[in-house]
Image (cartoon, grey):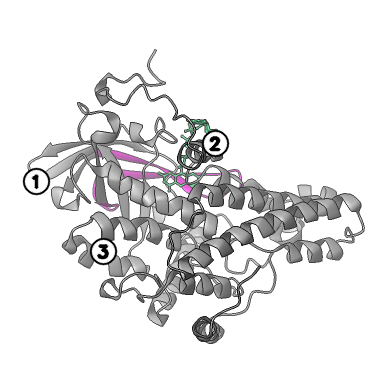
Amino acid sequence: MQRSDTPEQAEFRTEVREWLEAHAEPRKGEGDWSNGPREHTPEAEAAYFERCREWQRTRFDGGFACITWPEKYGGRGGTPVQEIIYGQEEAHFDVTAGFLPASISLVGPALMRHGSVEQCKRYLRPLMRGEETWCQLFSEPDAGSDLAAVRTRAERDGDEFVVNGQKLWTTSAQHCDYGILLARTNAEAPKHAGITFLLVDMKIPGIEVRPLITMKGDRHFNEVFFTDVRVDVANVCGEIDRGWAVAKTTLANESMMIGTGTQTQGTTASLVQYAMDHGRWEDPLVRQRVAEAYVQERLLGFLRDRLQEAVLEGRMPDVDGSVMKILWSESRTLRAEVGLDIQGTDGLLAGDDAFDHAYWQQLVLDRSMGSVGGGTLEVHRNGIGERVLGLAREPRADRDVAFRDLKTSTEG
Ligand SMILES: Cc1cc2nc3c(=O)[nH]c(=O)nc-3n(C[C@H](O)[C@H](O)[C@H](O)COP(=O)(O)OP(=O)(O)OC[C@H]3O[C@@H](n4cnc5c(N)ncnc54)[C@H](O)[C@@H]3O)c2cc1C
């Protein structure tokens, strides 16, 4: 059952709505892309990124960025429920801060929990305002699901680390000012124990960002190469060799954030309308698929309500982040596929020939965002098995072995 707002929540919702009406245009429909990058040229993508920065700045100046963060860091000092209400209301408007809210929620909590006072003072405000943008330099060719296997080295030289190695799948690195980097600082220790979490200026010499073009044609990801990059020891977040604890803070936020996000999730109502517009609503197969999408949407909605309810009552939510992430991803994929099915053979069209600027086609091609980004569905299922169901843990033969003695997939 959808909980109705308390008087305070209703008041906040009105404040948010009035502010949004004064600063943004209403969204016309789910396929309304006017704020997204339609063309995939570097110039168009850079312009889109600038629009995202601008909206983040507007939100911050209005007091609606980082609603739950403490006021001493520039947040609103508000409640998670207010954050949810803001997300629900913003979804009705034709605005986006793109991936910035995601990167903010990866970097900010890590800094607030593990960073020094100086680091918080220096980085948090420009981060929240979108003045300085951050990418996540975690994955590598041989370290994705098994993230603690990172091989990028950071070797101590006086008051600096010298970084060498390669990162992969780094979202928006080509537009970002800073990055959070996981690097190996001790190969004698077991793999989780010799990693350090570094804050890196992306403009310093020795960093090369090479965009990768996806099947959608965009430059979402990058390879990032580090050659003798010098990073000040003052840029360690947390403790040297104990960066895994900092990484865990960001990863926990990532799956919960992906699963609870409202901004990219449309509703089944728009699918029904879409089927009607295309004269497909009488087709029983289409209706059946729309019904499946509706069931998923409701399940996700109930879990979000349960989370919200727990937050309202001051309890720890008993809904696991991995469960939310899996359901969100599956629901998003199903909706995208139904959107394509409704178009029939027109669903094969791309570019200007396609309906709604190929909105549904793009969603289908973007499936890996939910199923791989922030950890694959298989790995999250393993996590649910171990954490929630108490099943036997995966065997970990590498637990007590020095990292330098581990075999890798590229060795014979
Ligand atoms: C949209 C998107 C954005 C991303 N952005 C970033 C970013 O900004 N920064 C960053 O650092 N990374 C980013 N990534 C990378 C992402 O975190 C990795 O792709 C992900 O962790 C999987 O790693 P991998 O690609 O190396 O696959 P692998 O780990 O090689 O997995 C290959 C296959 O094996 C399966 N598998 C692996 N281990 C197990 C296991 N133990 N049990 C069962 N199955 C298993 C996986 O499920 C998968 O199907 C992004 C990825 C996507 C899709």
Q: Are marks 2 and 1 in contact (CB under 8 Å)?
A: no
- How many dots with numbers? 3
Q: How far apart are labels 2 and 3 at the CA level? A: 35 Å
Q: Count residues near mark 3 (Cα–Cα under 10 Å), then give few for <14, some for 14-19, many for 20+.
A: some
Please indicate, yes or no, whether residue 400 appears anywhere in the rendered image. Answer: yes
- Looking at the image, tell me whether mark 2 or mark 3 is earlier in sequence order: 3
Instruction: Classify residue 204 as left or right of residue 312.
Output: left
Please give the residue where the numbered disc 2 appears in the rendered image. Answer: 378
Indicate the secondary structure of the residue bearing disc 3: helix
The amino acid at mark 2 is Glu
Q: Which is in the foreground here, disc 2 or disc 3?
A: 2
Label 2 C-beta lies within 8 Å of the nearest ligand 1 atom: yes
Pick whichever, 136 or 331, lies toward us. Answer: 331
| Residue 77 percent coordinates (x, y) | 35, 75
Q: Quadrant of residue 296?
A: bottom right
Please give the residue where the numbered disc 3 appears in the rendered image. Answer: 123
Q: Count residues near mark 1 (Cα–Cα under 10 Å), then give few for <14, some for 14-19, many for 20+.
A: few
Residue with the most extreme right position: 282
Residue at horizontal 39 percent and vertical 70 percent from the top: 66
The part of the chain drawn in magenta is: 200-227
Name the disc covering residue 70, or none.
Answer: none
Residue at horizontal 36 percent and vertical 61 percent from the top: 133
